[in-house]
Image (tube, grey):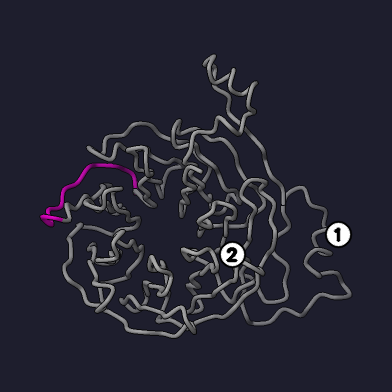
């Protein structure tokens, strides 16, 4: 694993003085937003105060799913690139073939024969140093990642294995793999960490899994190809994009029933709530718009944003929303109040599941 260590300096005299007196890390305005770039095999860190790149981590292959521990210490990066079991992952740039094979036990003497079983790699990363602490293989390509509120577990969705895998973040070991309905896409924990909710794109359902024993619970039918999920802060509602029919469903997480649906008028992707929980934002990828739902009235309005708005996150404490494009290498920075574009962050490739590391 290689880490490209880049810090972007500002010319303002007070900031320069702070760098001299306290060191560069102390002037990083937080929160930081970590953004995986998929096939570019890199993760960017963006300072949400300045919308400038401040760091990047290299050597993580095809990361689409990314999550962080609540204490900000670890990043968990899931690879969408699957390979035969027993086959080493792609060699990171700058690592010798000999060292790579030795690290993964893939020398001529020890290499396992490829099988029909597919696996991918989840990387456990020390966020501050960028060091990969452990690589854990899971049975299938990882789409998205979530971490439990107590930081004990990471869960990855396995889109071609119809399952989710659970990794313990104390010993970095695979705990279990739980079968779901077809094509699990996105997963989130309840605030108390006792339940895991999974959107099953291939089945048109959202299911609830009890963390105690990792046992499957009730399932609710939503719409076509349920995708991203977000939970209200008071856990009164769970929201899911139905990417295939252009709607967002509001689910009662206790009864696992759909209360109401919001029409967005095109294939969807990213989803998030405003910081006060009163507004829901959805990326309408197909029509190049951001949908905005007033949750008190149910009224839906739109702002143009093209091409192909993709992943979406509101950034607490900043009044901003970050939205990536599925067709252009950039992230839009929007004003959360009127959805106007404040700036654009240029990236390489496509930006995927964003992680916010809050102020310490």
Task: Name the spot of residue 334 as percent of width and height, x first.
Answer: 32, 38
Position above or below: 14 against 6: above
Q: Quadrant of residue 217?
A: bottom left
**113 in the magenta segment:** no
Asked whether the viewer can see residue 242, the reply is: no
Position above or below: 203 against 321: below
Position above or below: 213 against 126: below
Task: Name the spot of residue 73 as percent of width and height, x first.
Answer: 59, 53
What secondary structure do most residues of the magenta stretch adopt? loop
Question: Badge 1: how crowded within 10 Å, few (<14), some, or many (20+)?
Answer: few
Mark toward the start of the polypeptide (1 vs 2): 2
Question: Badge 2: how crowded within 10 Å, few (<14), some, or many (20+)?
Answer: many
**301 in the magenta segment:** yes
Count of numbered marks: 2
Secondary structure under badge 1? helix
Magenta part of the protein: which range?
296-308
Residue at the spot of label 1: 98
Task: Name the spot of residue 128 as percent of width and height, x first.
Answer: 63, 46
Residue 75 vs residue 106, the one in the foreground = 75
Asked whether the viewer can see residue 174, the reply is: yes
Is residue 40 shown left or right of residue 314?
A: right
Q: Which residue sits furthest top?
A: 13
Q: What residue is rendered at 60% in x and 66% in y? A: 169
Q: What residue is rendered at 52% in x and 56% in y? A: 68
Residue at the spot of label 2: 81
Position above or below: 233 against 184: above
Q: What residue is rendered at 69% in x and 64% in y? A: 89
């Amino acid at each position: 694993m290689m880490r490209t260590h880049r810090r972007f300096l500002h010319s303002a005299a007070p900031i320069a003085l702070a760098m001299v007196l306290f060191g560069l890390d102390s002037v990083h305005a937080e929160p930081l937003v970590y953004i995986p770039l998929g096939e570019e095999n890199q993760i960017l860190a963006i300072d949400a105060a300045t919308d400038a790149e401040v760091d990047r981590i290299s050597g993580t292959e095809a990361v689409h799913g990314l999550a962080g521990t609540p204490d900000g210490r670890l990043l968990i990066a899931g690879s969408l690139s699957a390979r035969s079991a027993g086959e080493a992952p792609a060699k990171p740039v700058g690592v010798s073939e000999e060292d790579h094979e030795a690290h993964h036990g893939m020398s001529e003497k020890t290499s396992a024969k490829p099988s029909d079983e597919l696996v991918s790699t989840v990387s456990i990363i020390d966020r501050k140093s960028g060091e990969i602490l452990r690589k854990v293989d899971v049975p299938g390509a990882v789409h998205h990642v979530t971490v439990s509120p107590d930081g004990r577990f990471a869960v990855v969705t396995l889109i071609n294995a119809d399952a989710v895998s659970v990794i313990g973040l104390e010993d970095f070991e695979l705990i279990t793999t739980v079968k779901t309905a077809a094509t699990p896409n996105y997963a989130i924990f309840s605030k108390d960490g006792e339940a895991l909710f999974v959107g099953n794109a291939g089945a048109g359902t959202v299911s609830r899994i009890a963390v105690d024993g990792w046992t499957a619970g009730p399932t609710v039918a939503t719409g076509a190809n349920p995708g991203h999920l977000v939970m209200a802060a008071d856990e009164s509602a769970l929201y899911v994009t139905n990417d295939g029919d252009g709607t967002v469903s509001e689910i009662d997480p206790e009864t696992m029933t759909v209360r109401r649906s919001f029409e967005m008028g095109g294939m969807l992707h990213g989803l998030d709530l405003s910081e006060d929980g009163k507004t829901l934002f959805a990326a309408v990828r197909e029509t190049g718009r951001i949908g905005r739902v007033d949750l008190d009235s149910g009224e839906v309005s739109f702002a143009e944003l093209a091409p192909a708005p993709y992943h979406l996150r509101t950034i607490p404490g900043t009044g901003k929303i970050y939205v990536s494009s599925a067709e252009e290498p950039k992230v839009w920075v929007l004003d959360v109040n009127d959805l106007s574009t404040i700036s654009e962050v240029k990236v390489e490739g496509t930006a995927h599941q964003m992680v916010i590391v809050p102020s310490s």
